[in-house]
Amino acid sequence: MRKSTIWLFAGVMVFAFIGLLYLQVSYIRIIMDNQKQQFDEAVKRSLYQVSHNLELDQAGKALTEQFEIARKKYLPKSKPLSYSQRFLAREQRRLNITADGTNASVEIGVSTEIVKNQLLDIAPSYGKNDLANASVNLQDAYQELYYHQQGLLQEAMKTLMKSDLAPIEERVNFRSLDSYIRSELLNNNLSLPYHFAIIEKDKNFVYQSPDFKVVDIRQSYSQVLFPKDPPQKLYTLLVSFPDRTDYLLKSVSFIAPSVAFSVVLLIVFILTIVIVFRQKRLSEMKSDFINNMTHELKTPVATISLASQMLKDGGVNKSPQLFSHISGVINDETKRLSFLIEKVLQMSLFEKNKTALKMKELDANDLLANVAHTFVIRVEKIGGWLDVELEAMESTIYVDEMHFTNVLFNLMENAVKYRKEEEPLKLLAKTRNEGDKIMISIQDNGVGIKKENLKKVFERFYRVHTGNRHDVKGFGLGLAYVKKIIDDHNGSIRIESEFGVGTTFTISLPYHKNGSVSSR
């Protein structure tokens, strides 16, 4: 599958996932807004009813006081009541006296009919004239009582107007206020905890429940108590709900799993696309590796084949110099072929999580010196020089000799490959101690590596682009092999390079001291 097709497929899927998440989040937001609006309206209705109940309480209290005053004032001076008067008093208690005279007349009229029927029941021996006179007298008594209670209502209204100037503590029972709030909230299906307070116009607290905090004011619902009071005497009821957010979130909890699953699917899809691209890149690298390997193997095989054909010629045996030259060519190409085969075998190491290492104690100074001594011939052959500085005092390391030797060879070979053609190679191999570590560095004055390529040099099959695919021999396995071996030795390797100046590879390993590997 082409990369453009994969990108198109990935783009469509990501767009679909993002669209799905957007719709889900938008749906959650809409539900939250609706729930918040319903919650706010329910709280406002509840608090308004609480304020209205307080007004009714105040009015009822004033009426009760006036009727009690009237009862104490008039009843002791009254004459004993007749049977009809006692019945009239019972009927009067059944009346709902209102401030509207018309309604009161209707109520009185209804009660008069009831009284007539009652009088017929209780006084069957009366004549019709007596009954008519009794009815007239009863209506006169009701009218007199009505005007009397109308006066009481006026007195109660005066009392209410005077009570408007009384302190809020005398007008409101805070315990009853708490029960009103709880009852009205329950009537609106709100059963979550709350805190409340009462403040004056200048924001001073008149009363606050034990759990009410000043910081709750910004998140509180407010309702003016006794809104018809003078402006300077207005008090405000504040109610806060500490669990309000959790209450609202519960309304959308059913959709949260779907959002979570969508996010998981999006993450899995992104990881899948990343893996697909990595596998595609690895496949392309392997294809490049096979192409390079085929090209590299053809040269020594062709050379050996040509040399073997020349050996079949009888004239070769007559010229010792030619025979020696052909033998040398076959030997060199055989070594080169073996080296290529070893590179291919190195690739199998990357399929294992851990390389099988034969660890033993070695002296890092001696190991580096031996590798440098072997490699110095190649450096001098191309007109360069190799310098060795062994400064490490603690130099015993615990490594696999073969693999670690190959690591040093690969780093030095990398310096030879990427040298400047117009400038002699200067190669420095150095050891030093740094804390409880031994540092082994290989420094050259080659072409260097650009910053954007530094993070990729240790990847398999990766080769820094040089403009010509075959101008530098190799398969992009050398530095990847170096990184893996160093990691398997619990060490680290870093690279410092400046394009056009040179490159330095530094290996850090714990040194062996008193029979154990030093570590922090």
Image (spheres, rainbow, N blue to C red):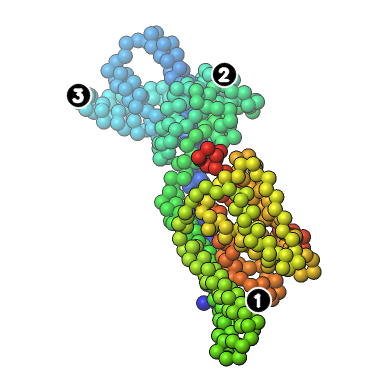
- The answer to which of marks 2 and 1 sits earlier in the sequence is 2
Residue 213 found in image quarter: top right
Q: In this view of the protein, which residue sits in the foreground, 233 or 192?
A: 192
Disc 1 vs disc 3: Cβ atoms closer than 8 Å?
no
Give the image location of residue 366, x and y in percent: 61, 51
Three-letter amino acid code of the residue under disc 2:
Pro
Q: Which of the pair 506/310 is nearer the observer?
A: 310
* 126 shown above or below 400: above
**Would you call the spot at circle 3 few (<14 residues within 10 Å), some (14-19), or many (20 or more)?**
few
Give the quadrant of residue 458.
Answer: bottom right
Q: Residues within 10 Å of mark 2 (few under 14, many from 20)?
A: few
Q: Which residue is mark 3?
A: 125
Earlier along the polypeptide chain: callout 3 or callout 2? 3
**Residue bearing the label numbered 1:** 470
Residue 444, x across and y down, in percent:
72, 59
Observer-nearest of 407 and 122:
407
Q: What residue lies at 66% left-to-right and 52% top-to-bottom?
A: 441
Is 270 placed left or right of 78 in the picture? right
Asked if residue 144 shows in the view, the reply is no
